[in-house]
Image (cartoon, coloured by chain):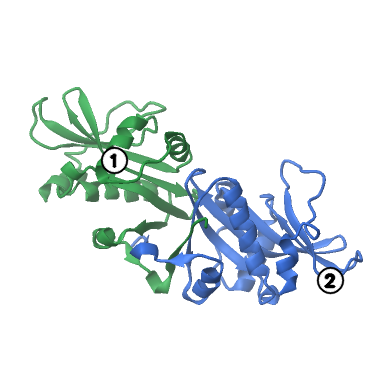
Chain colours: A green, B blue
Amino acid sequence: MGFWKSLFSSSDVTVPPRKTRTQEYIAALDAGGNTSSSARILFSTDRELDLYELEELCDAVGWSRRPLRKVKKAIQHSFLVISMWEVRGKRRRLIGFARATSDHAFNATLWDVAVHPAFQGKGLGKALMKQIVKKLRSEDISNITLFADPHVVDFYRNLGFIPDPEGIKGMFWYPN
Amino acid sequence: MGFWKSLFSSSDVTVPPRKTRTQEYIAALDAGGNTSSSARILFSTDRELDLYELEELCDAVGWSRRPLRKVKKAIQHSFLVISMWEVRGKRRRLIGFARATSDHAFNATLWDVAVHPAFQGKGLGKALMKQIVKKLRSEDISNITLFADPHVVDFYRNLGFIPDPEGIKGMFWYPN
């Protein structure tokens, strides 16, 4: 509980001094002590992801495989891409991911929210979502939407997402 | 009925010979005969809209006013913008609008679908939606989503949109 709750207290959040064009750490969290060998959780908005590493995460979550060419295009054209990493010394492992499409003004829609099963139940999904909402709010997006599978509706509800507000229905069209 | 049904038959669809950088007519429909004084319905993907004219349409539909600066930004950053016009001789009037955000690969989400009340009940909303779906499909987008107000759920259902498919819930987050 304190694990992710402490994430946003200023003393625990580390923002590296330099920000490159392709990489931006938005928060880091000590997850097990202060020695260099302990694990830290790190969030990044870098889009230059190893697509095979991302595919490994999506496989672990149980998603259907998608052409990497299209995944790359989708990442390039998303408004926000956030990845979550476990960092041990110099080694980092992709353990979470989410992205949002947006009109840069009013609405954003979240897609592909994933937390590696081995890291679920630790509050990391919540931490990831809070990073996303914080980032979108900082961009003045006020309407954040998503389409939730039935088993995660309560997860999002606990984060303040409302299903079918005022009777508004999420609807899908697929090719025949 | 024949009004919009005929829209997609090749003999009725007129594509102007020239396509400029900012303007693209995707279909035009004779709505009342063949003389130059009769009305035609025209679809455009031109983003260079008169924002006051768009605001007039949104007012007529009964939507809350939004800052034009943000509307402009949202239009610029939408994947697809479609406007629908009544054309009489040289005069054209904005009677419909819709836009979509997208990751350019998998998903698109429709926003701000509007048909002027004076032009509702003529099948023009359907025609507009069919243009949008056709355009998105031509861009290889397979998952088209939207959030429907309760009174238009059946309208979209008739067009093949499915509410809550497999229990997937549309959810919204607003600032406190």
Which residue is nearer to you in this view: B58 or A60? A60
Characterize the local packing of mark 2: few (<14), some (14-19) or many (20 or more) Cα atoms within 10 angstroms.
few
Can you tell which mark lies on residue B26?
none
Question: Residue B167's x, y, as percent?
Answer: 34, 65
Residue B39 shown left or right of residue B139 in the figure? right
The furthest residue to the top: A90
Q: Which residue is depicted at the point 30% across and 32% down?
A: A53
Residue B46 shown left or right of residue A110 in the figure? right
Can you tell which mark lies on residue B32?
2
Residue A31 visible to the viewer: yes
Q: Which residue is depicted at the point 55% across and 71% down?
A: B158
The furthest residue to the right: B35
Inspect the image, locate mark 1, and give the three-letter code of the amino acid beneath it: Asp
Which residue is nearer to you in this view: B162 or A157? B162
Characterize the local packing of mark 1: few (<14), some (14-19) or many (20 or more) Cα atoms within 10 angstroms.
few
Relative to B114, does residue B20 appear above or below in the rendering?
above
Q: Which residue is depicted at the point 69% across and 54% down?
A: B49
> Do tags 1 and 2 sit on the same chain?
no
Which residue is nearer to you in this view: B32 or A101? B32
Question: Residue A84's x, y, as percent?
Answer: 26, 38
Q: On the image, numbered disc 1 is attached to which residue? A: A59
Relative to B123, does residue A114 appear above or below in the rendering?
above
Tell me how far mark 1 sits from mark 2, CA to CA.
Answer: 56 Å
